[in-house]
Amino acid sequence: MRRTLALVAGLTVFVTARPLLAADPHAADSSVAEGAYPKPKAAVRSWNYVPAWNRVTWSSQSVIRYNPLGLQEMFELGYERRLFDTTNILFKESFVGLAFTPIVTPAFVNPGLTLRVQPLAVWRFDLRAGAAQYFGNFNLLQSWAKPETATFSDSELKEQGTRAPDKPKESYATTGTNYSIINEFRMGLLMDEANRPAIEARNRTWAMYHRMNLQPGDTVWYDQYFDLLAPKEGWTVSNDLDVIARFNLKGTSILRVGVRYNWAKAYIDGNTREDVNEGTHRVGPIVAYTLYDEPGGRVNRPTIIGILNWHTQHPYRTGQDVTQALPYIVVGYQVSGDLLP
């Protein structure tokens, strides 16, 4: 009887202990270690980031410029829906979205709605509808009966906008609507070891159709935003062509250095004024320093921007009113982020 009980007890201990003996002797320690010391996640970088299917994004671009003088805030708050379930670099950030895109300056506001489509990582286009309200300050808005009588140099705008009481100023408050098509395309010219563009070309075309409420008899007005004489109803086009070199610095900070060429033109029916028909041209360096680039955060890509462009063609900025040696100067700050998810 004792031998039988001892045998049963031995079998019980063996059966109970067998799974433990067969198991990895470090399994228990490993589970505790993993729970107590989780492995850090891989750093999110722009080249390995895959956006969420649904995003609410925001961005802000604050700019001060000179020649012509201006101060602007362009804010965006929008929803984006990812288009493709892929990690392919060309398609992983493809999306369609809708955004509230107000433009705010001391002289006017232009709230708008933008439908944005990015079919490829290298191609994006916007369709925007806006409503402008000019306040009648800062010598704006001014308009004329025809291009041949328009005087829109800085000195003339100032004189006409600040006349004595016996000669009423010519600037006035008014409203208008505008419709834009913005197309941006980029192409890598030289790739780095991670297959990212070390040098790239970017071309951004902004075509805007204006419908302004001008004073009776006037057909053209000075659009300070594009620095052009513009039609009461019609198109203006501005094109930026950049060639940019990218330098990856410590951490995720990035320095971009390059050259920008800008061309702009207003299409005015029946205009015979050659210096207006030729449009404006300017060229010069552009520099941007991004403090960090870690996609998906609430605040990301804080970037300081500097632009110096010299006018090569302009009715008044190549010596007629302003010396050609004085460049178009821009200092800006840009930041963006994801509010959801």
Image (cartoon, rainbow, N blue to C red):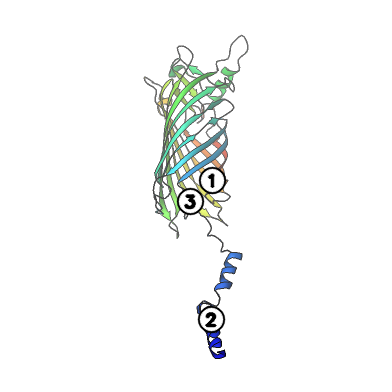
Give the left or right position of residue 35, taking residue 217 as reference: right
Query: In the image, which disc is placed on residue 245?
Result: 3
The answer to which image quadrant residue 116 occupies is: top left
Q: CA distance from mark 2 to mark 3?
A: 74 Å
Amino acid carrying label 1: it is Val
Q: Between residue 99 and residue 142, name the one nearer to us.
A: 99
- The single residue placed furthest to the right in the displayed view is 165
What is the crowding at mark 2: few (fewer than 14 residues within 10 Å), some, or many (at least 20)? few
Q: Is residue 268 above or below residue 14?
A: above
| Location of residue 211 (image quadrant) | top left
> Is 325 situated above or below 291?
above
The span from disc 3 to disc 1 (Cα, nearest Å) is: 10 Å
Residue at position x 56%, y 87% in the image: 6
* Residue 23 location (% of width, % of height): 51, 77
Q: Mark 2 or mark 3: name the one nearer the start of the chain.
A: 2
Q: Residue at x 56, y 32 (%)?
A: 72
What residue is at 59 percent from the left and 27 percent from the top? 106
**Mark 3 or 1, nearer chain start:** 3
- Amino acid, disc 2: Thr
| SS class, disc 3 | strand
Element carrying mark 2: helix
Q: Quadrant of residue 173?
A: top right
Residue at numbered disc 2: 12
Point out residue 152 in the picture as x, y percentages from the top left corner: 51, 22
Residue located beneath label 1 in the image = 287
Give x and y (percent) for residue 233: 41, 21
Tag count in the figure? Answer: 3
N-term mark: 2 or 1:
2
Label 1 residue SS: strand
Question: The disc labelled 3 sits on which kind of residue?
Answer: Ala
